[in-house]
Amino acid sequence: MKEHQEHHHQPAKSQEKSKAGKEKLQLEEKALHGHREAMPHGKGTPPPHGEHVGHGGHGHDHHRMMIEDFKRRFWISLVLSAPVIVLSPMVQHILGYSLDVPYSMYIAFILSSIIFFYGGWPFLTGLAEEVKKGAPGMMTLIGVAITVAYLYSTAVTFGLEGMDFFWELATLIVVMLLGHWIEMKSLLGASKALELLVSMMPAEAQVIRNGQPVTVRVEELKQGDIILVKPGEKVPADGVVVQGESYLNESMLTGESKPVQKDKDDKVIGGSINGNGSLQVRVESTGKDSYLNKVIHLVQEAQKTKSETQRLADKAAKWLAYLALTAGFGTLAAWLLAGAELDFALERMVTVMVISCPHALGLAIPLVVAISTAVSANNGLLIRNRTAFENSRNITTIIFDKTGTLTQGSHEVAQVVVFQQTINERELLGWAAGVEQHSEHYISQGILKKAKAEGITVPVSENFNYLPGKGLEGTVAGHDVKVVGPNYIKEYNVQVPQSQAEEGVETVVYVLVDRQVAGYITLRDQIRPESAGAIQVLKANGIKNLLLTGDNERVAQSVSDKLGMDGYLANVLPHQKQEKVKELQQQGEFVAMTGDGVNDAPALAQADVGIAVGSGTDVAAETADIILVNSNPQDIASLILFGKATYRKMIQNLIWATGYNIIALPLAAGVLYNQGVMISPAVGAALMSLSTVIVAVNAQLLRRQIK
């Protein structure tokens, strides 16, 4: 039995201020950074030096400017391409018409030059950057292809024997611009969650000074300031309610759909929306230390972190680039050696390079990363380690901490039992609450919470005194009331009727009124309503689940049995949890550890996937791979299923982004030329861009995979 030995060892005291977060983040500078990291290389010019982002999300403004730039280049190039295509001798031959326009070749040259230098500028600068870095990629392929086509066609215009490639050049650039435009719009949509998070913070706050509210900028708030939050306003900073009562909408921050009631001494999160009551809040965390900024930081870091799958895609893109260059120039050499004309050989080379372009491959993984991270954050899953998130599909065993993970983590009143016929349960609870209101002990808080839930007015008490290791006493409505544990009962040999409490699972406190035992109250750490469902989902997916707790044997067995778990270990110290994780790993199990991120830190770090249940703790942020904001065990099951869905999307995109090369490359090189099968540069560009669009759409479908 958990004895009441440490109950009320000290009188009431103010709660300690929450420890400032270790995450160092500047909101104005970080929001854009995460978005840029998710963008494919070569998407326009970099932002001006020193540019930063304010609460309005100016980083997205820059991204939108880049999108508008590609859009403008696309439409101008498309308009200029129309006459180039119409004047092309090849197009005239294919469509069976003839136009006799004076200086038509020179007109096509001038228009194509504008298209090449204006529409193709992003690809040419991208080519230069990749060559400078010694890392050829998609921009190298596009840049080389359009440059070769332009130079060859220019030479034909001014006397070289052959047929110009102006129409292929124009259509290639137009299709590439269209593909990039669509991709960038997709990427912007994928990272809107961060923009929403940034925009959630209000720009101004009302600070109480000399009894009057004064408007200041949020950046000027300091720890300890008292701010006024009116109905309907956003809370400008993390803090604690010092006056007032209201309901706050925290859904965008925590995923909790219902407004949360906030009273005096309750914590509030900056960015949440106040309901119909006014609150005065003491500021505890601002700027880089605020909860919202930590969320933004975690999301950005997850987007920037390259997972194993993403690194595989990078390697594939690099080697595909080398392959494309080799195949392109090899095709040119092969056809020239075979006696083909230079224009035909160049056409085959250009087409091979277009088909080989790993543009969709470069987008396949980053887009899934951006979407999955944003969707996860909106559903209370903060991913710090991308590899661990993807590896969640491999989990064979999950170890659960008990307190605060599968259970509520706070002792709730389970039973109120009355021995005397002259009083009822409400009166007994009210007398106990009258004494307990002077203490912050978890038993006191549990009794007071129950009294409040029952609508009981807590009576005024006097002569408060705490009995070290035994309990509390005071005078309530003229009666001598004591709320004590088993130690007091034993020491003073107080005779009490037999308790019906579940020994070893429930904590029992006895209520003595005028030295007579009036009854007792039991408290226990209640199992979360979602825990049973989470265990069922895990078992249905073939994942073993174990309970490791520092609590006693009876408590551990009770929780394990009620949830139908595969086993438990009780009285486990933090280092023993870590040893258990190692033991399971040595047996070939892929282990996930879930805990509150404090005493479970060693095991969280040791596990293949560390999942911190509960938000805001420094230890959790440092040791866990994934943080579940809502402290909901059901989210663990959702995490694993979503991790599997994310991995599937990555593999699907990798296959689609590279698979079409198996068929298209030989056709582009002219392997079946004698059979009349050949892919032109324009068709090659269309295939590549189609692949890119399909990859982007497939990634967007990931949003449907989490509920």
Image (cartoon, rainbow, N blue to C red):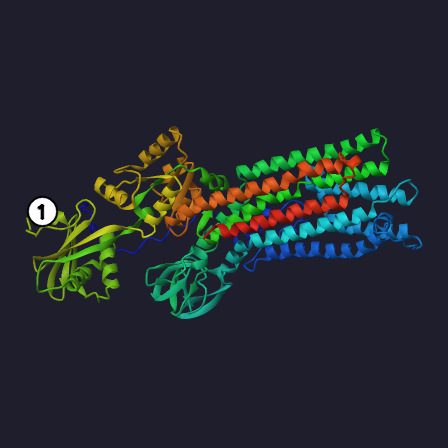
- List the single residue furthest toward the front: 675
Find residue 70 and report its horizontal and vertical position in percent.
70, 54
Query: Does the rendering let one see residue 33?
Result: no
Find residue 151 and report its horizontal and vertical position in percent.
84, 42
Query: Does the rendering let one see residue 413?
Result: yes
Given residues 295 and 497, the one toward you in this image is 497
Q: Are there few (<14), some (14-19), or many (20+) residues within 10 Å of tag 1?
A: few
Q: In the image, 319: left or right of 206?
A: right
- The residue under the point 85% across, 41% down is 152
Find residue 699 and report its horizontal and vertical position in percent.
56, 48
At numbered mark 1, what does the secondary structure look like: helix, strand or loop? helix
Quadrant where the N terminus is found in the figure: top left
Residue corresponding to mark 1: 490
Given residues 154 and 171, the one toward you in this image is 171
- The residue under the point 32% across, 47% down is 406
Q: Is residue 38 above or below residue 250?
A: above
> What amino acid is labelled 1 in the image?
Lys
- The residue under the point 79% across, 51% down is 115
Given residues 155 and 645, the one toward you in this image is 645
Find residue 87 and report its horizontal and vertical position in percent.
86, 53
